[in-house]
Amino acid sequence: MANEHVLINIRDLAAEMLAPYPEYFVVDVRIKPTNNIKLFVDGDNGVPVEKLVAFNRNLYPRLEGANLFPDNDFSLEVSSPGLDEPLKLNRQYLKNIGRKVAVTFLDNTEKEGTLLAATEEKITIEETVGKKKEKVTTEINLSEIKHTMVCIVF
């Protein structure tokens, strides 16, 4: 696992870079053993590819200047979290209100439904249950959630 100090430094540098753009935020930072840094950035209305490229070009020299890796031996990827990444932050839940989500609980049980609301403590989903396809609204504490994925609906 990457050094916590290095991860915090990268997160701080990325947050500093994003400060002029309040609609964008850091979701996650991962470092592979090969010093490949993966920075996941999201936006309240998504992130255009051109922005991701600009963020990569802006962050790279900041990382070089921080001397976090011997001989600046690292690579950097800046991307938005794909649909295969779970929702992690309240802002991600908020931007996905109205979409179908699959919630996996800590005990590995699941519920699927439409995300209706999100706060810092809980989310509200509307499930369709039974043969009569009744709509049931359920509040779920974030502390009970293992992960939440946005469902791809065709």
Image (cartoon, rainbow, N blue to C red):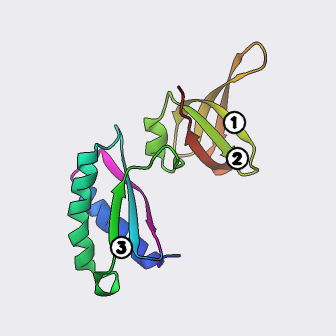
Alpha-carbon span between mark 1 and mark 2? 8 Å
Q: Look at the numbered disc 2 and give the secondary structure of its residue.
A: strand
Residue at x 43%, y 78% (from the top left corner): 5
Q: Which residues are magenta?
A: 19-32
Left or right: where 107 falls relative to 64:
right
Report whether residue 107 is seen: yes
Position of residue 83 measured from the top left corner of the image (x, y, whole percent): 49, 43
Report whether residue 19 is seen: no
CB-based contact (under 8 Å), mark 1 and mark 2? yes
Q: Look at the numbered disc 1 and give the secondary structure of its residue.
A: strand
Residue at x 43%, y 76% (from the top left corner): 34
Q: Which mark is residue 105?
A: 2
CB-based contact (under 8 Å), mark 3 and mark 1? no
Does label 1 or label 2 sit earlier along the sequence?
2
Does label 3 or label 2 sit earlier along the sequence?
3
Q: Which mark is residue 9?
A: 3
The three-letter amino acid code for the residue at tag 2 is Phe
Residue at x 29%, y 67% (from the top left corner): 13
Position of residue 82 measured from the top left corner of the image (x, y, whole percent): 45, 46
Q: Please name the residue that numbered disc 1 is placed on.
A: 111
